[in-house]
Amino acid sequence: MGIFDIFKKPDNGNNPKTAEQRKKQTEKHLKSLNIPFIDHLPLIEEEREVRIRTAQEIAERILVLVYLTYCSEVPDERENVIDFLKTNSLWDKVSPDEKVLFQKKELTDQETANISWRSEGVWLLLWTINKVDKLELPTEQVEIPEIVSRLPKFLTDPSEFIKAAIVKPTTEILDASDLIYRLHWATRNANLNNQPMPASLDLSIIMERHYAINWVTIYADEWDEVSTDT
């Protein structure tokens, strides 16, 4: 069972869960996993009010992140990739900070590491457009071949991948958002207090998932401006 399957309930679409109901549901699940939480951590958005990125926006963002990762690992392909992105109307989807990284002749070790970690956010984004069936607890890093197998072949026309993308129901995305938010608090709290990570959770994976899901739910208009407050 995927980590969010526990939240699935029949819904006729007329009575979405309130943010308070979603919080209580998440807390009950965290308690069952012996993962700490605090009652006064705020609610996330109400389902009736939240805005969700389109499936096409999410698919485009996935491709940008994956090609940036590729360029960080194979810098000699940088110009070819930039040309490809421009030819396929994706260069305009690259954030200002990412354009700097794409065009930089030599990345620092920290920049390369930061880009690599974005793969965890890519996995979350793939889930939001139904390219990943289930999201498990964030305890182990994603295998890159698992990502690549769900994408168009390298430097081939991505238009069908983008066009065919279908975003998950809002309620499922918000279930994920609420859980990731509260998992992030639990792992940050453990880290700050030099305590073992509850349930073997990985703080870095959770940070990347939190960043990605907050972009999907439009915490900020631009990718570079997303925050992951807890």
Image: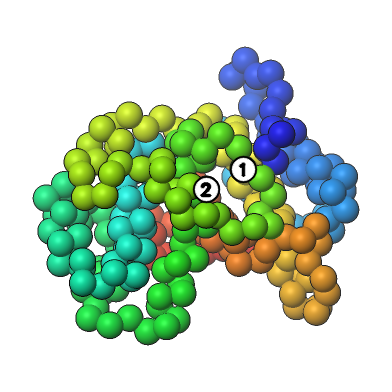
Within 10 Å of disc 1 (Cα), the crowding (few <14, some 14-19, many 20+) is some
Q: Is residue 125 above or below residue 82?
A: above
Q: Is residue 129 visible?
A: yes
Where residue 209 appears, x then y in whole percent?
A: 56, 55
Where residue 52 appears, x then y in whole percent?
A: 45, 40
What's the residue at 41%, 43% (across, down)? 149
| Total labels drawn | 2
Q: Nearer the viewer, residue 63 or 15?
A: 63
Res 135 label:
1
Q: Which quadrant of the rendered structure holds the C terminus? A: bottom right
Which secondary structure lies at badge 1? Answer: loop
What's the residue at 45%, 51% (across, down)? 145
Q: Nearer the viewer, residue 160 or 56?
A: 160
Q: Is residue 143 above or below residue 101?
A: above
Quadrant for residue 82, please give it.
Answer: bottom left
Within 10 Å of disc 2 (Cα), the crowding (few <14, some 14-19, many 20+) is many
What's the residue at 38%, 36% (across, down)? 55
Res 99 label:
none
Q: Earlier in the sequence, mark 1 or mark 2?
A: 2
In the rendered view, does 194 fall on the left or right side of 81?
A: right
Q: Which quadrant of the rendered structure holds the N terminus? A: top right
Residue pushed farthest front? 145
Query: How far, Cα to Cα, is label 1 from label 2?
Result: 8 Å
Task: Answer whether labels 1 and 2 touch (C-beta < 8 Å).
Answer: yes
Where residue 18 appears, x then y in whole percent?
A: 68, 34
Res 124 label:
2
